[in-house]
Image: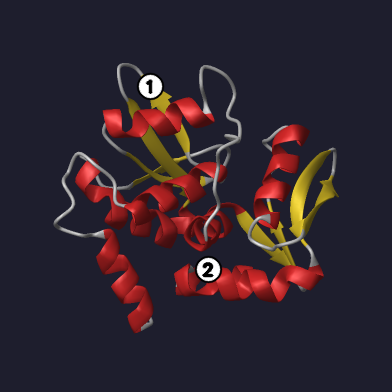
Amino acid sequence: MTSYFIRFILNCMNEDNPEGSLTEIEKQIVEGCLVGDATMRIKTNSLIEINHSFKQKALVDHLYFILKRFVLTPPKMRNGNGNRLAYRFTTRSLAIFNPFYFRYFGGQNKHIPKDLKLTPISLAYWLMDDGSKSNSSVYLNTQQFTLEDQKLLLNKLLELHINATLNKDKIYQRIRISVSSILVFKQMVLPFVLPEFRYKLP
C-alpha cells in the first residue's frame, strides 16, 4: 500500500473529528457507496448497510475500518441468495445519516439526488463497490436506477470531464466509460482504489 494511500486512510480516521459528525472524506466515501450497492433503512434515524459477496471482503473490512466508530458489530459472513456467501455490517441508526437517507431514498425507491457532486474519492468507491472491467472498457453497474437517473449520472461524470454512455446489458442499461476518457478516469481514481480492486481498471 502506497504511503499516499496510508496518509489518506489516516485522514479518514481524524481523531479530532467529533463522533457526532462525518469528515469530508467520509462523506465522499459514503456518497460513492450509495451510488453503488449500499442501502439504508430508517426508523427515527437512519443506518447504512454495507453488504457484498464474501469475494469483496477486502472492501467491506476497509469500509468498516473507516466507519467503525459508528458501528457496534464488526462485519459478519452469512448465507445470501442461493450459494452466495454474503459479508456485511450495518452502522448504528444515527441522525448524521438522515440527510443521506432522504436524498437517496426519500420514501421511495433508491434514486440519484440531483445535488450529487462526484469527486475522485466518491468515484473510486463507486468503482470498487459496483464497477467492472471487460477488456479495455470500464462499466459502472447502474442497472438498478431509472433511465432518468442514469442520464443524470452521465452528466455528473461529465462535470469531471469524463465522457460516458449507456450500454445495454440484457434488458437493462449500465454506464460505460468512453475509451477517450479511460486514462482520465484511471488517473483520477487510482490513488484511492485499494490494491485488491485495481483489477477493475484496464
Q: Secondary structure at mark 2?
A: helix
The answer to whether 143 is drawn above or below residue 105 in the figure is below
**10 Å neighbourhood of mark 2: few (<14), some, or many (≥20)?**
some
**10 Å neighbourhood of mark 1: few (<14), some, or many (≥20)?**
some
- Residue 37 visible somewhere in the drawing: no
- Residue 162 visible somewhere in the drawing: yes
Location of mark 2 (residue): 197
Q: Earlier in the sequence, mark 1 or mark 2?
A: 1
Give the mark toward the camera: 1 or 2: 1
Residue nearest the viewer, comparing 104 with 81: 104
Q: Secondary structure at mark 1?
A: strand
What amino acid is labelled 2 in the image? Phe
Image x and y of residue 125, in percent: 50, 57
Q: Is residue 89 left or right of residue 55?
A: left
| C-alpha span from label 1 to label 2 | 31 Å
What amino acid is labelled 1 in the image? Ile
Residue at the (52%, 31%) spot, across then down: 104
Q: Is residue 113 left or right of residue 98?
A: right
Residue nearest the viewer, comparing 68 with 57: 68
The answer to whether 24 is drawn above or below residue 39 in the figure is below
Residue at the (46%, 69%) spot, across then down: 192
Q: Is residue 164 left or right of residue 26?
A: right
Residue at the (59%, 76%) spot, across then down: 187
Split into 4 quadrants, where in the image is the C terminus? bottom right
Image x and y of residue 86, in percent: 46, 45
Image x and y of residue 109, in percent: 59, 23
Image x and y of residue 101, in percent: 44, 29
Residue at the (74%, 69%) spot, across then down: 181
Location of mark 1 (residue): 42
